[in-house]
Image (spheres, rainbow, N blue to C red):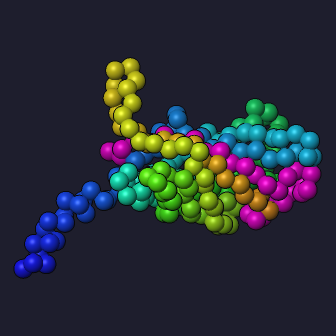
Amino acid sequence: MRTAAFLLAALPMLAQAAPAAFTVDPTHTAVYFAASHFDRTTVRGRFGKIDGRISYDTATGLGGIDFTIDTASLDTGNRSLDGVLRSSQFLDAAQYPYARLRADRFIVENGKLVAVEGEFTLHDVTQPLRLEADRFSCGDTVLMGIRRYVCGGDFHATLSRSAFGISRFLPDVGDTVTLQISVEASPAR
């Protein structure tokens, strides 16, 4: 009887601990990349088409992410370079149209999200990836009189492109790729 009473009393707390589901806002979400070019300059670009889901509990810091990145949405501002990077020499967007980022470990220190750990899949190769949180918060926003609750932030990580089988032009084109991820998400409907 006591156990049943305890479980009934704990139900509201358990319900609060369940992470809320969020859908990524594609107009406020992008993945930026940078890599060294002949150790003299840096090639930069972005992936503009990201589909994603986030689950997050602001009280416990528990959650997960699942992002799909359209590799053909790469844009450096240079059409010729975009074509090379989308080709089989690098991303091979025709054969591997998507990269995927999945994580289920949110690292919270002193009530603040500091990192997300999971895995990144590119070229059908999956490697561990840790995203460092530059900032992250959740709260109400008001835009043109419309109030909505959003979570968002900026994250960064580095990866080795050769670890995913992308080794063309090494070492002239750097092996280390820096990722910057900006994300905003609203409660899923």
Identified at 19% across, 66% down, the residue is 10
- Residue situated in front as seen by the camera: 57 or 186: 57
Establish if 26 lies above or below 165: above
Query: Residue 83, located in which quarter of the rendered image?
Result: top right
Report whether residue 71 is seen: no
- Residue situated in front as seen by the camera: 113 or 19: 113
Report whether residue 10 is seen: yes
Left or right relative to 32: residue 115: left
Left or right relative to 10: residue 23: right
Q: How many marks?
A: 0
Establish if 80 lies above or below 60: above
Give coordinates of residue 162: x percent, y percent.
Answer: 80, 62
Give coordinates of residue 109: x percent, y percent.
Answer: 49, 56
Give coordinates of residue 68: x percent, y percent.
Answer: 56, 52
Give coordinates of residue 71: x percent, y percent.
Answer: 66, 48
Left or right relative to 2: residue 185: right
Identified at 6% across, 79% down, the residue is 1
Query: Residue 176, located in which quarter of the rendered image?
Result: bottom right
- Residue situated in front as seen by the camera: 1 or 68: 1
Identified at 30% across, 59% down, the residue is 17
Query: In the orientation shown, which residue stands out farthest toward the top?
Result: 144
Establish if 87 lies above or below 182: below
Say which quadrant the C terminus sits in.
Answer: top left
Identified at 77% across, 58% down, the residue is 161
Establish if 79 lies above or below 187: above
Query: In the orientation shown, which residue stands out farthest toward the left?
Result: 1
Span colored in magenta: 163-189
Q: Report if residue 179 lies within the magenta region.
A: yes
Query: Residue 9, located in which quarter of the rendered image?
Result: bottom left
